[in-house]
Each structure stands twice: as C-alpha cells, then as structure tokens.
Image: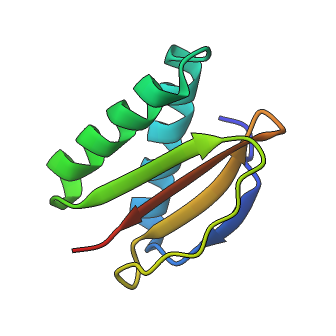
Amino acid sequence: MGRLPIAHSDMPEEMRVETMELCVTACEKFSNNNESAAKMIKETMDKKFGSSWHVVIGEGFGFEITHEVKNLLYLYFGGTLAVCVWKCS
C-alpha cells in the first residue's frame, strides 16, 4: 500500500494502520460510489472496534466534530478524495 497523506489522526498505530487499509479497500472496491464505501467502512469498524462509528467520504468538505479521544482518522485518498472516520457515543 502506498503512503496515504494523513491530514489528522489520534488513533493508536495498530488501529490507524488497519483503518487506513480498510479505507483503501473500500474506496477501491466502490470507486464510483462513496456512499457504499462509507457504509462498508462504518460496518467493519462497528464490528471490529464497537459501535457508533461515522464515516464521511467526498471532495471539498469541511467539518467540526466531537469524537472519542484516540478514535479519529482523516486522510486523503487518490489525491482529492477525503475520508474521515470517527467514533462518538
């Protein structure tokens, strides 16, 4: 896997690596459907790390969120596509 530009993350290393790999897999599998990619990431994260994960995938969005500490990943995929994954209860 090539290096992905991480805009921000406070996840522990192991979780971050797993989540990044999941994001790449989902974005490649559903390259023309961000909604399906986000759903795949959310459902996988819920199963693996407990419920209440949220995922936004798109271009040109900003955000301000409240999240559980050590449960946020924001990265860019393929140049312009941004993926934000976070957990809040």
What residue appears at the point 52 percent right and 78 percent down from the top-left corner?
10
* Point 43% across, 74% down: residue: 12
- Residue shown at the point (61%, 60%) measured from the top left: 74
Residue 24, by quadrant, is top right
Scheme of image coloration: rainbow
Front-lying residue, 70 or 14: 70
Left/right of residue 47 with respect to residue 5 in the rendered view: left
What is the residue that sits farthest to the right in this orientation?
79
Left or right of 86? Residue 46 is: left
Q: Nearer the viewer, residue 58 or 17?
A: 58
Residue 3 placement, left or right of 69:
right
Quadrant of the drawing holding the C terminus: bottom left
Q: How many circles with numbers are drawn on the protein?
A: 0
Quarter of the image with the N terminus is top right
Query: Would you place residue 42 above or below residue 8 in this image?
Result: above
Name the image quarter holding residue 81: top right
Residue 9 horizontal/vertical position (percent) = 58, 71
Task: Judge whether 81 appears above or below 56 on screen.
Answer: above
Left or right, 48 with reference to 28: left
Outermost residue toward the bottom in this view: 69
Is the residue 35 above or below the residue 17 in the image?
Answer: above
Question: In this view of the protein, which residue sits in the foreground, 19 or 56?
Answer: 56
- x, y percentage for residue 8? 66, 71
Residue 41 on image: x %, y %: 38, 39
How far across and down, in percent of the image, does residue 33 sit? 54, 19
